[in-house]
Image (tube, rainbow, N blue to C red):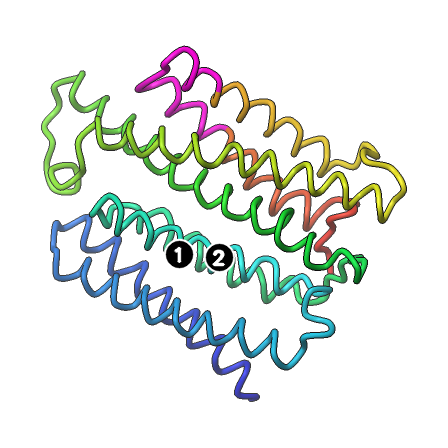
Amino acid sequence: MALFEILQYVIIGLYLVGTGAFLAGSLVSRNSLIRVGNIFAVLGFIMHTVDLTVAVTLYHETVLDGGYFYYSILGWGLILVYFFFWWKFRNTFFALTASPLALLLFISSLAAQSLKVTLPKHLAGLFIGLHIGTIFVSIALMAMAAGAGAAFLYLNNKIKSKAAISGFGKDMPSLNSFDRINHWAIVVGFPLYTLGLAAGFLWARSVYKQMFSWDPKEIVTLVVWFLFAFLFHQRIALGWKGRKPAMLVIIVFVITMVSLWGINFFMNTHHSFKP
C-alpha cells in the first residue's frame, strides 16, 4: 500500500474517532469525551492539510482537474470553519455538524477520483479563488447555520412543550445563541455564495460559450440562491428570528447536499462526478 493511501486511511480514522467522541460526549454529557473529539479533529485536520499539500505538490499540473481535490477541500474547509466558530463563539457544539460531514466528504473524495473537470488553465486562479473558494466557504457556513437551526428547533420544542430537558439538552447553548449564530452565518454566507455563483457563470461562458445552459446543477444552484436570497432579505430587512430562519436554512442546506451528492454522482451534468 502506498504511503499516500495510508495517509488517507489515517485521516478517515482520526475523523471517525473524533466524530464518535463528539457524539458520545454530547449524549452522556462528558466534557472529557468532547475534548478527545476536539483533539482528534485537530489531528485529522493536520493530516488532511498534509494530504492536500502532498497532492498539490506531487500532482500540481493535474490536481485541479481531478474530482478528489474538490470534495476533499470542502471537507477540509468545513473543519476550518468549525475551528473558527469554536474560537469566535467559544462553543464546541458545532462539531456535531462539522465532524461527520467532513468525514463523509473526505470518503466521497476518494470515490470521485476519476472525475475530470474542464478547467481552462488561464482561469485556474480565478476559478479556484472566486468560484470554488467562495462557494465552499458559504456551504460550510450554511452547514453551521443549519446545525444551529436544527438545535434551535429541538430546544424550542422542548421548552414550549414543557418537556424535561436532560442529558444532551442540558449542555446545549441558549436559544439566543443558536439564533445569533444562524444570523451571523447567513449574513456572511449569502454574499459569498452570490460571488461564487457569479464567478461560476463567467467560467461557464468561457468554457461552454454561454452562461446558462439549463444544466441540472445550474438549475438547482439557482433555486438554492433564490431561497438563500429570500432568507437573507427576511433576516436583514424584516428582522426574521427564531423558527422561520431556522427551518428555511435547513431546507436550503438539504437541497445543497442533495445537489452535491445526488446530481454530481447520478445525473448527466457539467459537474458530473460519475466514475
Amino acid type, mark 2: Gly
240 versus 47 height, above or below: above
Q: Is residue 257 magenta?
A: no
- The region drawn magenta spans 233-251
Q: Residue furthest right?
A: 209
**Residue found at x 48% / y 17%:** 233
Which corner quadrant holds the C terminus?
Answer: bottom right
Pointer 1 local density, CA inside 10 Å: few below 14, some 14–19, many at least 20: many
Q: Quadrant of residue 202?
A: top right
* Tag 1 residue: 79
Pointer 2: residues within 10 angstroms few (<14), some, or many (20+)? Answer: many
Q: Quadrant of the N terminus?
A: bottom right
Please, what is the three-letter code of the amino acid marked with disc 1?
A: Ile
- Most extreme residue toward the top, as rendered? 238
Locate residue 197 relative to residue 35 in the image: left or right.
right
Q: Is residue 101 left or right of residue 266?
A: left
Q: Is residue 161 above or below residue 213?
A: above
Q: For this rendering, which residue is in front, 187 or 253? A: 187
Q: CA distance from mark 2 to mark 1?
A: 7 Å
Q: Position of residue 195 (x, y in %)?
A: 61, 38
Q: Position of residue 132 (x, y in %)?
A: 62, 50
Describe the element under mark 2 as helix, strand or loop. helix
Could you say which is closer to the camera, residue 198 or residue 214? 198
Circle 2/circle 1 CB separation < 8 Å: yes
Which residue occupies 36% across, 47% down? 97
Q: Residue at x 71, y 39 (%)?
A: 217
Locate residue 120: give its quadrant. bottom right
**Residue 144 image-quadrant placement:** top left
Q: Which mark is residue 22?
A: none
Q: Residue 75 got which mark?
A: 2
